[in-house]
Amino acid sequence: MKPVGVALAVAGLAAVAAIPWLEPAARVAPRVGVVLVTGAINALLLVGWAFVIRPAWVRTPAEAYAERLLEAAERL
């Protein structure tokens, strides 16, 4: 899922960066705050997907989930 997350974050960042070139300045000016916040969120998501989420980071929760799932299956 990491490549998908990185690709979507890059696409979102590119879309936000393209707004000033695609929209007339008069339409973008009232929404500058929204554009900046959206761009910042996409940048944070990109950093998170690229540098924070690692296989070792998700392994422990994944193993805990697998154990709970097998315990539930045994009860059924």
Image: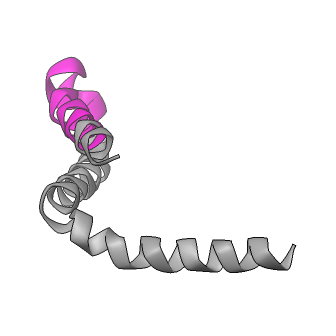
Give residue 44's position: percent from left, percent from top.
20, 60
User: Height in image: 64 above or below 33?
Assistant: below
Give residue 7's position: percent from left, percent from top.
24, 36
Q: Which residue is at 66% across, 73% downward?
A: 70
- Whether residue 25 is in magenta: the answer is yes
* Residue numbers of the magenta segment: 8-28
User: Which quadrant: the C terminus?
Assistant: bottom right
User: Height in image: 54 above or below 38?
Assistant: below
Give residue 57's position: percent from left, percent from top.
26, 73
Query: In which quadrant of the rendered view does residue 14 lie?
Result: top left
Question: Is 34 placed left or right of 56 in the picture?
Answer: right
Along the line of sight, the residue nearer the viewer: 14 or 2:
2
Give residue 61's position: percent from left, percent from top.
43, 77
Query: In which quadrant of the rendered view does residue 17 lie?
Result: top left
Query: In which quadrant of the rendered view does residue 28 lie?
Result: top left
Q: Which residue is at 30% across, 45% downward?
A: 5
